Amino acid sequence: MCGITGIVTQNSDNIGELLVRCSSKLTYRGYDSVGVAAVRNGAVDLRKDVGTIEEVNELLGLSSMKGDRGIAQLRWATYGAPTKMNAQPHFGCEEVFYGAHNGNLHNYVEYKKELIETGHIVRSENDGELCVHAVDKYYEQTGDMFEAVRLSIQDLKGAFAYAVGRADEQEIYAVKMGSSLVAGVADNATIVSSDLPSVLPLTNNVIYLADGEMLVLTPHDVKVYRIEDGKQLERVPQISYVDARAAEKGGYPHFMLKEINEQPKVAQDVLGILESSKNEEWLKLIENASRHYLVACGSSYNASIVGTYYFNRLAGIPMLHAIGGQFQPMYGTTMDEDSLSILVSQSGETKDILNVLNLINAKHYGKTLGVLNVIGSTLMFQADSHIPMACGYEVSVPATKTYFSQSIIFAYLAAKLGERNGHIDSSEAKIFINQLRNDLPSLTQTTIDRTGILAKNLARTMMDVKDLYCLGYGFTDGVAREGALKIKEICYNHCEGMYSSEFKHGPLSIVTKNYPVIFTTTTEDSWMVINHINEVKARHGRTIVVGEFEKTLEPYVANKHDYLEVPKSDVLINPLLDVIPLQLLSYFLSVDIGINPDLPRNLSKTLTVD
Ligand code: BG6
């Protein structure tokens, strides 16, 4: 996934500074390589190289580039290795057309061959370059930039968004075909971007786009058109109330630590959303379906596993969970119009999830309910209904507060549904929901405060650990997988998350003296987990416990820092808290190792590619 930003200004000459300031807010979308194309007096100055935007700016002076319009791109490599030539933006055949894309061209190989055979000079191995050549090609035929952009789409197959301009024209054009795109109108400039954080430094006067739409940026306004027939569409800018400070660290050394510490507020805010009037719509969608699926990727998938336990236990709903890419092969033939798929994606742009959305809509496989954080995302526009996660922007690539929000949403919905269908007593439901509303925010803060130092001390003893397991049981099944994912993402260690009762059926063979195995527990299942801990302890493995303190477990941890004690809470609140020490452990270990947890290598915040 990448981030594109295009800006057109009225008579200013500092386009480089504007593009760097705005596009740097998209770093979480890609940081393999960066480039800026700045246009001044009909000439394009194109500078790009591998590295983060800070590194490339230092190297090539991006901020000092002159001009009144231009395009910047931050890349996360798919087609073509991260190299200077494959960095974006790209030129067309000559240094006249310039542009950049985000997404994937599925017909890259054959289209590149066709272009070369028809005389195009294609310089890179990156599919984004072909978008510029496609416009170049149709401009040759039409002599008109608007038509050239509109017609270029017929050559391009896949899911993408791109921005393109001509050196001798002041406008910048952009198209949305499956990847995110949003525009903004400031007093003396207009902007188009892959995501809202890079628009906000310029304006909060925002225009959201839908797939199949294109836009024309002029110095004064943004015009939106339907690509199919070129018809202009009325699209009034809306004021975005997303706090631009969300894209600042607020005094924390990393966004990840800031976002972990925002979780008490997330707990408070998401309950406010859940108790709003719209929840009746969400509850009815679930009640009216005969089959229910939770579909997600990455951390959102781990939260969905936790959700599956809540829906089964509290609401008696046999919810199934599926990884985005697994959904069609596994459930594609058993879906019907009475199914409900809850699509869980904080970005609302993960391609694996949008593929499921498109399948369901195309095959009329029932309804869809999005659980998403980014307002204006494709999932928000295209799902039958959506629950906003109310987390504020999550900038750090490893998810923390969004996973936390999702888990709370599932716990709440399950309790409400269980109360309505009689699966649990109304009093039990009310007590649990009161705990979510009144106790969880402060319990979250206490957990951060108490386990922060424990996690920091534990991390110090794990500096040379390269391989470990993180095991869960019952409600901590998804929690352990999330803890393992965090360690994989930002410590570059192999940490496998799995079910603790399964460990003896094979993986136990890995255990030798001091081999570390983390066990997440709740007071409901520690009687069982103690057997699994024993199986490791008996083979002199190092057993680390995460959960509420229990005397029975104390003998199984070699020393204090191997017990990440979570504050006492209701047995079904416990699983929500157990993830926090694991988030903190991975964070401190990552920093101790010398990794930037916000920008782990090879990863990206949102993968808008297959
Ligand atoms: C990955 C991110 O690319 O996508 C993870 O690195 C995230 O942090 C996963 O959990 C799913 O993203 P989303 O936006 O669909 O929740």
Image (tube, helix red, strand yellow):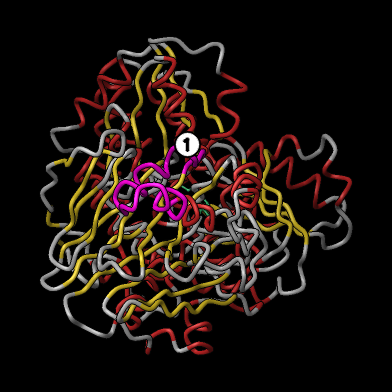
Question: Which residue is more in the foreground, 148 or 317?
Answer: 148
Which residue is denoted by mark 1 in the rendering?
Answer: 353
Question: Which residue is more in the foreground, 153 or 567?
Answer: 153
Q: In the rendered structure, which amino acid carries the disc numbered 1? A: Ile
Report the label total: 1
Residue 49 vertical placement versus 66 (above, below): above
Q: Is mark 1 within 8 Å of ligand 1?
A: yes
| Residue extent of the magenta highlight | 135-159
Tell me the residue at 85%/50% (across/down): 538
Q: Position of residue 448 (x, y in %)?
A: 42, 65
Element type where label 1 sits in the image: helix
Q: Position of residue 370 (x, y in %)?
A: 34, 34
- The quarter holding residue 145 reads bottom left
Q: Is residue 6 magenta?
A: no
Q: On the rendered structure, is 7 left or right of 300?
A: left
Question: Which residue is more in the foreground, 122 or 384?
Answer: 122
Residue 492 vertical placement versus 427 (above, below): below
Tell me the residue at 45%/89% (across/down): 61
Q: Residues within 10 Å of mark 1 (few under 14, many from 20)?
A: many
Q: Position of residue 260 (x, y in %)?
A: 41, 64
Q: Is residue 578 visible?
A: no
